[in-house]
């Protein structure tokens, strides 16, 4: 085995096992307090801000937590910038090089707006996390790639549309997405709503909605461009509940009438059987489906449902009142 192959193997091994559960004994209360204590600080002196956030904290992970929390709680999504990017995506469709050239020029405007108004898009979030981490002597990288969400349920990997971070802690690489952690957008309005599920996320879950351009950051040997764009649609609530959908593997499933469909997922934290449901919508009315053979074994949960009528069904896996995965079942 060559040295290069060995290094790549070690890199993938270290990242594939890196997740927040590695730090289950760490209390982030002090780190979160430092982020809160410095709320509203401006960005004209990043070294000073990094010092204030991290100097009193004893470990790398607590320092990174303070930085991450501060960025998520003090930076807002810039909706006009995002809309402009979406328009440019359409204009440069099929011309990725042209989009990259335009985007590289536009980044100057992005960073100026970030430092002045504390508003930005995903690239700005990832940039600020990286800069503050660097100033705290923590190795951190910006990862560019493709993000699947309700707003961007991409069907092919044409142009990169998202950025996030990889951070090295205790000689392991971890993944986080400060943009999606910070909140969400409804009707062109940014709603602050911190989602801890995107902080040092389980890499297999992360790969369900994040696909890097640089394949050195691929976390799952089974993840390919085809499996990524075909996989079930997941949500912020999926990350909050730490749910990894397993089957069906694809969002679009074709079956025949009276065929049984097997649903399964991995729960990274404890959930109860009575919190699990499968629903569909008839118009705007929600209709629960009668699932059966519900099994739960060491976090692996599965159940079945039989489709007795022809039609096209939007099916949603739900934990409590939160939808965590969506499938489209065509019954012929």
Image (cartoon, helix red, strand yellow):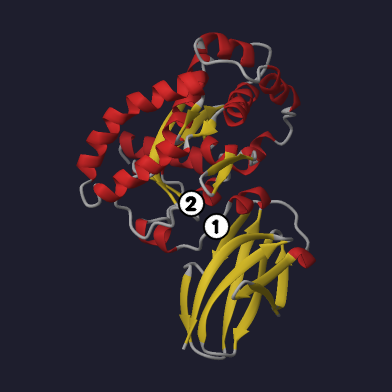
* Distance of label 2 from label 1 (alpha carbons): 7 Å
- Which residue position holds label 2? 209
Residue 114: x, y in percent? 46, 24
Give the side of residue 279 with respect to residue 105, left or right.
Answer: right
Question: Regarding mark 2 in the picture, which secondary structure is present there?
Answer: loop
Q: Considering depth in this image, is 304 or 183 the residue closer to the camera?
A: 183
Find out whether the residues at labels 2 and 1 contact each other: C-beta distance under 8 Å: yes
**Viewer can see residue 159:** no
Q: Which mark is residue 67?
A: none
Q: Quadrant of residue 97?
A: top left
Which badge, 2 or 1, comes first in the chain's sequence?
A: 2
- Which residue position holds label 1? 234
Q: Residue at x 61, y 49 (%)?
A: 239
Residue 108: x, y in percent? 33, 24
Whether residue 287 is situated above or below residue 325 in the rendered picture: below
Whether residue 96 is situated above or below residue 282 in the rendered picture: above
- The quadrant of the picture occupied by the N terminus is top left
Residue 235: x, y in percent? 57, 54
Give the side of residue 77 with respect to residue 273, left or right.
Answer: left
Q: Residue at x 63, y 59 (%)?
A: 266
Whether residue 120 is situated above or below residue 116 in the rendered picture: below
Give the side of residue 44 with respect to residue 324, left or right.
Answer: left
């Amino acid at each position: 085995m060559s040295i290069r192959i060995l290094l790549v193997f070690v890199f993938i091994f270290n990242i594939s096992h890196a997740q927040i559960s590695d730090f289950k004994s760490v209390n982030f209360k002090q780190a979160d307090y430092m982020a809160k204590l410095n709320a509203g600080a401006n960005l004209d002196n990043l070294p000073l801000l990094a010092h204030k956030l991290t100097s009193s904290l004893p470990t790398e992970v607590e320092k990174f937590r303070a930085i991450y929390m501060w960025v998520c709680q003090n930076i807002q999504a810039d909706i006009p910038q995002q809309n402009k990017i979406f328009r440019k995506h359409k204009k440069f469709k099929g011309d990725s090089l042209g989009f990259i050239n335009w985007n590289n020029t536009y980044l100057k405007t992005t960073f100026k707006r970030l430092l002045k108004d504390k508003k930005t898009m995903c690239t700005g979030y990832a940039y600020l996390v990286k800069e503050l981490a660097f100033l705290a002597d923590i190795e951190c990288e910006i990862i560019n790639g493709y993000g699947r969400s309700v707003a961007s349920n991409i069907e092919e990997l044409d142009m990169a549309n998202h950025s996030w971070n990889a951070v090295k802690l205790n000689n392991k690489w971890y993944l986080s997405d400060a943009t999606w952690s910070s909140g969400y957008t409804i009707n062109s309005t940014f709603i602050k709503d911190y989602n801890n599920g995107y902080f040092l996320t389980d890499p297999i879950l992360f790969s369900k909605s994040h696909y890097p351009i640089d394949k050195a950051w691929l976390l799952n040997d089974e993840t390919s461009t085809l499996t990524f764009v075909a996989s079930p649609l997941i949500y912020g609530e999926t990350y909050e509940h730490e749910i990894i959908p397993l089957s069906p593997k694809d969002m679009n499933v074709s079956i025949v009438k009276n065929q049984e469909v097997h649903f399964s997922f991995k729960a990274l934290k404890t959930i109860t059987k009575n919190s699990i449901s499968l629903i569909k919508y008839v118009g705007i009315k929600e209709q629960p489906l009668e699932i059966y053979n519900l099994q739960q074994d060491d976090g692996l949960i599965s159940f079945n449902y039989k489709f007795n009528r022809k039609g096209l069904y939007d099916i949603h896996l739900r934990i409590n009142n939160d939808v965590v995965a969506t499938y489209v079942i065509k019954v012929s």
